[in-house]
Image (tube, helix red, strand yellow):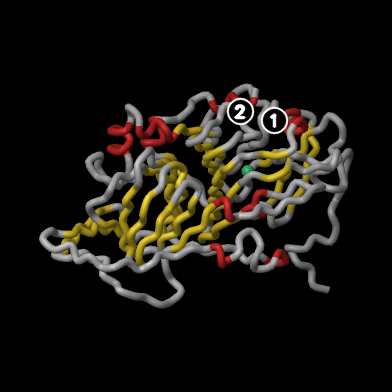
């Protein structure tokens, strides 16, 4: 008989525990999930007498972090842009990087009408429109966008933003590998969102834009090369193929849930990259069965750093977190619901939160720009 490392012969059980994870916890205990490969791999559940986040002090780099990205564009804007990887404050498009590793870089950007085009040679760009709307011009045509849209722009595509009026705040997740969507498995190909809900750009009438010079800013290894043309370089009058810019709105993503069992965050995966995933936490009813957990279990992210960007609604499992803020829980240290979240979740029927999660298999680093807007006391918020 072949013994696979992936399929244990038996789950061991010791002491006081529940047989069904996340349901009917022994009274007075706090469940911790200790698992591999995010929520796919081998796993044990520990039933603890105290929340593992009940620390008195944390010293060292694994301290949970929280950043208020709104402040990047307040009085700290100049310093933040100066501390970011590229761009200058005069640029209409100057993403401010706050966390990065060799697989992904996360930025916050407040574009103005761009009089130049941009092309990222380093990776695919996934934008999440946190606030604002406008028109995106690309090699493949134009696409209008609004709050809640994800815009996926393949590596090497030339584009520019023509934002509408009002505040513009976009989360940019730059992926150094190709962005794909996950296989729906047993849920079938139309689950989460039907591929027919995807919108792609339309070819507009061409305006050569004579009498001026048109610039394309090409980024490679965070250095900009500027190429100039005597005509508007977005001059494709047609295209064919399966590589293009596309858009899906979070309102068109239909979360999967169980009324009897708290599903792991991985069920909310929207995009896959090499060594990273993007998940969307969207409005949904809570589990309705009496013994079923309604808030995320405690865990220590054995194989992933976890980043959450809070966009809209009430973030039921975290106190003191508002729209436009980010939390970063590095691999190795526990996280889980805030103390008040467990009783509060029992009083409510549903959550209206909209949040974007980025989990990365390799350790992230914070940039100096992130340091400018860090909430230094976040680690103490579980007390
Ligand atoms: Fe987590």
Task: Please tell me whether residue 190 is drawn above or below residue 160 in the rendered image.
Answer: below
Residue 236 in the image: x percent, y percent? 29, 72
Q: Is residue 380 visible in this depiction of the protein?
A: yes
**Ligand 1 sits in quadrant:** top right
- For image coordinates 18% across by 59% down, the residue present is 214
Q: CA distance from mark 1 to mark 2?
A: 8 Å
- The front one of 340 and 50 is 340
**167 left or right of 20 in image:** left
Q: How many marks?
A: 2
Question: Are there few (<14), some (14-19), or many (20+) residues within 10 Å of tag 1?
Answer: some
Q: Earlier in the sequence, mark 1 or mark 2?
A: 2
The image quadrant where one finds the N terminus is: bottom right
**248 left or right of 232 in image:** right
- The front one of 277 and 160 is 160
Mark 2 lies within 8 Å of ligand 1 (Cβ measured):
no
Residue receiving disc 1 = 341
Return the residue found at the far bottom. 240
Residue receiving disc 2 = 319
Mark 1 lies within 8 Å of ligand 1 (Cβ measured):
no
Residue 211 in the image: x percent, y percent? 10, 60
- For image coordinates 55% across by 30% down, the residue present is 321
**17 left or right of 36 in image:** right
- For image coordinates 44% across by 46% down, the residue present is 171
Give the structural element (helix, strand or loop) at label 2: loop
Residue 93 in the image: x percent, y percent? 30, 47
């Amino acid at each position: 008989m072949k013994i696979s490392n992936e399929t244990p012969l038996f789950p061991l059980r010791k002491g006081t525990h529940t047989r069904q994870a996340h349901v009917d916890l022994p009274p007075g205990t706090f469940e911790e999930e200790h698992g591999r490969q995010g929520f796919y791999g081998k796993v044990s559940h520990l039933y603890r007498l105290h929340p593992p986040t009940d620390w008195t002090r944390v010293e060292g780099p694994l301290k949970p972090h929280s950043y208020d990205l709104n402040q990047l564009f307040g009085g700290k804007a100049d310093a933040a842009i100066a501390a970011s990887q590229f761009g200058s404050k005069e640029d209409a498009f100057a993403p401010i990087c706050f966390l990065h590793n060799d697989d992904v870089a996360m930025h916050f950007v407040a574009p103005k009408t761009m009089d130049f085009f941009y092309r990222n040679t380093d990776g695919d760009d996934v934008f999440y429109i946190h606030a604002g709307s406008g028109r995106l011009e690309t090699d493949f045509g134009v696409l209008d966008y609004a709050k809640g849209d994800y815009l996926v722009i393949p590596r090497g595509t030339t584009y520019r933003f023509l934002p509408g009026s009002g505040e513009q705040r976009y989360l940019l997740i730059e992926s150094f590998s190709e962005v794909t969507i996950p296989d729906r498995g047993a849920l079938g190909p139309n689950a989460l969102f039907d591929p027919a809900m995807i919108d792609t750009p339309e070819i507009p009438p061409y305006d050569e834009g004579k009498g001026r010079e048109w610039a394309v800013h090409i980024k490679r290894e965070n250095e900009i090369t500027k190429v100039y043309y005597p005509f508007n370089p977005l001059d494709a009058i047609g295209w064919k193929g399966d590589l293009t810019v596309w858009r899906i709105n979070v309102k068109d993503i239909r979360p999967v849930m169980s009324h009897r069992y708290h599903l792991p965050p991985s069920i909310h995966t929207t995009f896959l990259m090499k060594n990273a995933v993007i998940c969307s936490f969207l409005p949904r009813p809570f589990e309705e069965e009496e013994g079923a957990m309604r808030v995320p279990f405690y865990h220590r992210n054995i194989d992933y750093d976890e980043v959450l960007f809070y966009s809209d609604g009430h973030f039921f499992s975290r106190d003191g977190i508002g729209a436009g803020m980010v939390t970063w829980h590095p691999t190795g240290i526990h996280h889980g619901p805030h103390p008040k979240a467990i009783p509060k979740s029992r009083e409510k029927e549903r959550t209206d939160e909209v949040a974007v999660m980025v989990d990365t298999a390799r350790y992230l680093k914070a940039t100096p720009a992130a340091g400018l807007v860090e909430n230094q006391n976040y680690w103490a918020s579980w007390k």
